[in-house]
Every structure is written in structure tokens, then in C-alpha cells.
Image (cartoon, helix red, strand yellow):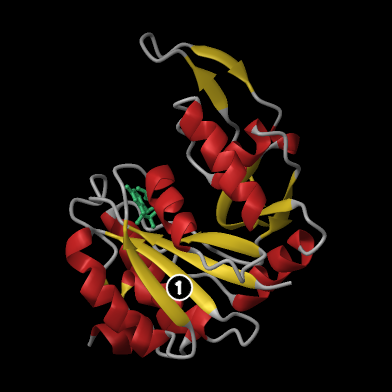
Amino acid sequence: MTFCAVVVAAGRGERFGQPKQLVEVAGRPLAAWSLATVGAMPELGDVVIATEPQSILTFERLAREFAPRLRAMVVAGGATRQESVARALAAVPDRCDAVFVHDGARPLLVAADVRAGMAVTASGTGAVLAAPVADTIKVVAPDSRSVVRTLDRTELWAAQTPQFAMLADLRAAHAAAAAAAFVGTDEAMLLERAGYRVVVVPASGENFKVTLPGDRDRAEAILRRRMGVPASAAAG
Ligand code: C5P
């Protein structure tokens, strides 16, 4: 089965304070870390990247530098993450049987976790990298902030990316969502809604999304540690 990678790296980074996809983290633009991870996987041949229109040329260059073995296609993203994914899916070559969609804002992804998701989807089901929830989650009324109920933590997982599916299934799930003007926050939500089975794959380590400025520093410390560079040396 041929898998293709989709990396979404568009958006204005409103919570971060600036478009974050090209912010420098441990010596590379943020999204280059994910490109390097997928670029080093010999079982992959294609990557489709969605980014802001003004960053297309930059991402073409980053793909050549960090994923030189892959055929890369860079497309303009949309106003929502879902729209960016839909545009990227339209550009995925037909030789791909299955895809995984990864947030360019998650630089800590490791190839072993990508392979674990690919192994699940090889049987045709959707898969999503996820972690069991550590906090107790409350459902809260938006206006009064009153707790409406507390969810059973033993059945809660926090969804991450990559999210994996057969290409035809994910395209169908996106088309169904678009037809109903439904906007979800991840691929799994669209797949579930369209009746496809999705299985969680436990992430082997940290794989958080750089959302707030402090996340960048946390990601940098972890990446430098993995490279064997003490944070103090990196700072100095
Ligand atoms: O905004 P958020 O942090 O949830 O974005 C998750 C991922 O989706 C990021 O990698 C971001 O670049 C991408 N995204 C996108 N198009 C948008 C909004 C977000 O590709 N319109």
C-alpha cells in the first residue's frame, strides 16, 4: 500500500501572535522538523504541503532541503484547517492509496509513531495518534461557566496528528462535511461522522502542537536534548 504525507502549515497563528509555521525552533523553521521526519522515511514517496500563499516558494525550498528524496507539492491553504486539508487532499497524486495528515506545528513527531499508524491503516481503518487524557475534563456552560458534567477520564484520549486514512475514505468524508457545511477540528471527526471506523494509536512520547509562545521554548528544549545538545550550551 502506498502512503502519502500531507503536512498542513497554513493559518495566521492567532493564539501564537504571528504565523508560526516558519518561526525558528532549535535552528530550523518549525514546520521543517516534520518535513525532515517524513523525508527520512524510505517507505514514503510524496508529500503535499498546504501553507499561506506567500509562503509557497519558501516551503518548496524547505521541502528540497529537508525532504529531498520526496516529490513535494505545495498548495495554498484555506481559512480553516479543514479547508487547508481539503485543498491538500485534492493535490494528492492518485498513486497514493492512503494518506496521513500531520500538523506542521507538531515538530516532535517520530517516524516510529508514523509507522504505527500506517500499520493500522494498512487494514483499511482510520487511525489517529493520541494520548490518554491526564486531567479531569469538565463540560462547562459557556456563559455562566457552571460545570454541566464531568466526563469519565478512563475513556478520554487527546487526539494529535498524524491522522491516517484510505485516500478515498478521507476525500469522501471531507466531501460529506463540505456538503453539510460541517467544520470539524480534525480528520477523525469527519471520518467518524461519515461512518468510518477510526482507531487510536498511542503516541510514544511528547507530540504537542506549538500553540502558545511558551510551547516553542518547550519544543526547542526537547529537540536540542534529542540532538544531544544541552539547553544551556544551545542558549549560550
Ligand atoms: O491553528 P492550529 O494550531 O489548530 O493549527 C493546527 C495546524 O493546522 C497547524 O499546523 C496549522 O499550520 C494548520 N492550519 C492550516 N490552515 C489553517 C489553520 C491551521 O493549515 N487555516
Kindly identify the residue that appears in the image at 46 percent across and 56 percent down. Answer: 90
Question: Could you say which is closer to the camera, residue 187 or residue 130?
Answer: 187
Question: Could you say which is closer to the camera, residue 93 or residue 148?
Answer: 93
Number of marks present in the image shown: 1
Kindly identify the residue that appears in the image at 40 percent across and 90 percent down. Answer: 229
Residue 12 shows in the view: yes
Amino acid type, callout 1: Ser
Residue that carries the numbered disc 1 in the rendered image: 34
Q: Secondary structure at mark 1?
A: helix
Query: x, y (%) of residue 52?
Result: 24, 58
Q: Quadrant of the C terminus?
A: bottom left
Residue 23 shows in the view: no
Other-residue count near label 1 (Cα within 10 Å), few / some / many at <14 / 14–19 / ≥20: many
Query: x, y (%) of residue 118?
Result: 71, 67
Kindly identify the residue that appears in the image at 49 percent across and 29 percent down. Answer: 179
Left of 72 or right of it: where is 113? right
Left of 53 or right of it: where is 74? right
Name, please, the residue furthest toward the right: 123
Does 96 appear above or below 13? below
Query: x, y (%) of residue 225?
Result: 46, 82
